[in-house]
Structures are given as structure tokens and as C-alpha cells.
Amino acid sequence: MNRLIVVSNRIAAVGEGKSSVGGLAVGVLGALKKHGGIWFGWSGEVTARPASEPNVFTVGRLTYATIDLSPDDYEDYYNGFANRTLWPLFHYRIQLSDFSRRTLKAYNRVNALFAARLAPLIEDGDDIWVHDYHLIPLGAELRRAGVDQRIGFFLHTPFPAPEVLVTLPDHQSLVHSLSAYDLIGFQTESDLRAFLEYVVHEARGEIMPEGHVQLFGRKLITGVFPIGIDTEDLARQAQIAGKSRQSERLDRSLNDRDLIIGVDRLDYSKGLVERFQAFERFLEAYPTNRGQVALMQIAPPSRTEVPEYMEIRRSLEETAGHINGRFAEFDWVPIRYLNKSFNRRSLAGFFRTSRIGLVTPLRDGMNLVAKEYVASQNPEDPGVLVLSRFAGAARELHSALIVNPYDIDEVSEALERGLRMSMPERRERWDAMMKHLRKNDIEAWRHKFLAALERV
């Protein structure tokens, strides 16, 4: 295929090892190393006077091109419109979506900046792949800059139903900018359906056969491309990590108790407070589990400057303290709450040690933790995945115990069922999910998307 240019809000640092990157980074690096190309994005640095040209450097066949952001752009574009307006709205948290014309202006300004810095690096025949909600207007800005190459866009978050999206002032301009792309990819059929409903009922567009759409006078293609993981590599890592010093230390600390594990970025969309409440109900409803089961929740902080994230951290700490104060004994603490991060290999070992993977977001585009948990299990003695119906992964991992995260009784019952599940049933469920993950891994995801882009 042609040379590929990938654009994301941030890029993975060159020095990061395979065990520390995941999701988008694994897929992007694999595609770029195979075909050659450029990974363009924000460096993660905030400087008073950003350079007028991107910092470009090459490693093998892969070229990195990064730009810095000014303090105002970082605050209004990243913390502001991207993460205080679009992120909560796209996760159906209308009451948390804070709109202002100032941050919208910064959002459009930074997208124009990305386009201006990227356009000189684009060559004839390049294919361009833009990622996620931070950069929705980028395609339109590139078109304004004279770029006529094929441009695809993939949304990693959910796409909200029209009734939710129209609460956003200037929603039509946001969707109008999507019409600049040749291909738009979504995680699930539900997300695509929401987009198409907006096309018909709000934009007065037209839906045509084979995913084609007429939107604001331009034809484009839509499709569903659920992102996967590097299944076999993670399974190998988990087998090794299961015997590591960290995993053995964790196992010894459990003292033959069962472990329930949750791993999530500290975010209100992940349903962490509701998860703790469900675990509390579990201890109430099934008292024989007291002293026999522990919940370990790993929740590294993110977006620490955003007020809503400060609040979720405070609420989670209070809830964990309440539950531990209520049920703890001198030799057992029900919740182990770790506000820190671990690399992928360590997490794979922790997943392998646990009896239940508890993945209960209130809304999630995909949630790769669910898939990573399954891939990390011991085939001879696999754990059980308890999964929110509102995670995109629930559309694929049908053999998980699917729950409504708002129903703490249902989650509690699923925990009890998972702990009591027979070995044959656990193996059958795990095998079905693992077959799907092997067939639909990260390589299949990027191949399907880029093949669709090539056909444009």
C-alpha cells in the first residue's frame, strides 16, 4: 500500500517498550513499521513559544513528527473543549459537558495548527489516518490546505445518539467537518447507527448501499472496525509474567483468597464508584465471601487539572475508605485501591492471578482491558470476565457475564456466580472469547481499516 501518515493527539514516545504501550500505539506502530510513514501528533510538551516547525526524527522506516502546545492551547483545547466538552458528551454525561465559545475556538485553532504543520510533510500518494475526538476538524482543515489525498478517520470513543449530540451548541459544524473524510470508522454498530441517524434526521443527508453516505454535499464511506489487541503477544507475556516476582508477591499476599481485579484510568466514565458500591453489596449479600475475596482496583490518575477528575478521585477514595472501614479485619482488607500505573506485562501477570476481571464502565467505546484480561488467562484454569453491557467489547465477548453497571445487585450476583462457576464452564466461556480475540486482533483491525481506505 501507499505510505501511511497517522495523526493522533499524542504519539507514543520512541523509547517506550512494547510492554508499556498498548491499544492505539501497538496498532499504529505495527502499520507504520510495515509500510513506512509518519506518526504526527502533540509531543506532550507545553511551551510558552512553540516552534514554528515540527520536530522530525526517524527511527528505521518510521518518522516521528511532533509539535508542542502553548499553555493557552493546552488549557482550552485539551483540558477544555476536548476533555470537558466532547469527552463527557460522547460518553452520555451531558450534565458534565461544559461548553464555551472560547474553548471551541481553541479546539478549531489547534486543529488548524496541526493541519498547517502536517501539510508540508504530505507527499503525493500518501494515505492519511486521523484518530479520535480531539481531531475531528482536522480533515476539513487539511482540505482547506489543499490536501486531496485519501483521509480516513477512526473514532475510539462512542458516538452519541442524536438526542445527546444536539445538546452541543454548534453540533452541526462538528459533524459537517466529518464530511471532509473519505472513510469514517466506528467501534460498534451502535455508534454507526447513531451517526447515521444524525445524518438522516439532523443533516438531511442520505444513506446509500454498502456504507456510503451523502453528507453536506459530499460522499463518504462509513464502517465498523472494532479495535483489537495483540492477542498472542499478550498471552505469551502473561504466561511469563504469571511467574514473575511481582505476581508471586501478589499471590502470597492473597493467602489463598480469590482476587477480583479492575484496571481503569481514573475517569468518571469507568463507573468506579458504582463498582465499589456493587462490591459492597456483594459482601452484604454473600457474607461467606468476607475474608475470602479481595478487590484490587488499579486506577492511575489522568487529566488531573480537570475539576471533574479531581472530584471522581475524592469520591472513589471516600467510598473505598467507607467499605474498608465497614468490613476490614485485622488480617484482611476488602479493597486494595492503587492510584498508580503498571506496565502491560505486570498487568498481564495480575490478570492471570485473578479469579474475576471486573470491567464495568458506564459507557466505553471499546475497553481493551476486557480483551487483555481474557488473553492473559491460564487456559487450564481461566478466570471469569464480568463486563458492562455499555462497553463496546460486550458486542464481541458474548461469553462474558454481561451486566448493567447501574444495577449494583446484578453486578453483585455476577461476582458470586463467577466465583462459584465450574471449571468446565469457565474453560468453555474463555475458549469462545479467545477464539474471537485471535481472529480479530490488532493486526486484523488495522488491515480492515486500511484496506477499506485503499478502496476509496
Image (tube, grey):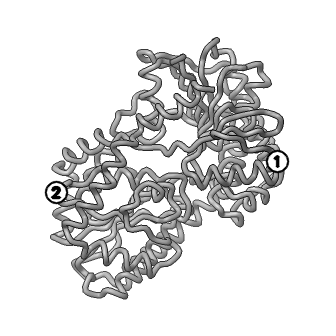
On the question of residue 350 being in view, the answer is: no
Q: Can you tell which quarter of the image residue 17 is in?
A: top left
Label drawn at residue 203: 1
In this view, the residue in front, 21 or 373, is 373
Q: Amino acid at mark 2?
A: Glu
Residue 239 pos. (x, y %): 20, 47
Dot 1: element: loop
245 is higher (above) or lower (below) than 412: above
- Percent x, y for residue 145? 77, 21
Residue 123 circle label? none
- Reading the chain from its start, which is encountered first: label 1 or label 2? 1
Q: Residue at x 53, y 74 (%)?
A: 406
Q: Which mark is residue 380?
A: 2
**Horizontal relation, residue 257 to residue 179: left or right:** left
Q: Would you place residue 296 above or below residue 84 in this image? A: below
* Quarter of the figure with the C terminus: top right
Label 2: how many Cα within 10 Å (few below 14, some 14–19, many 20+): few
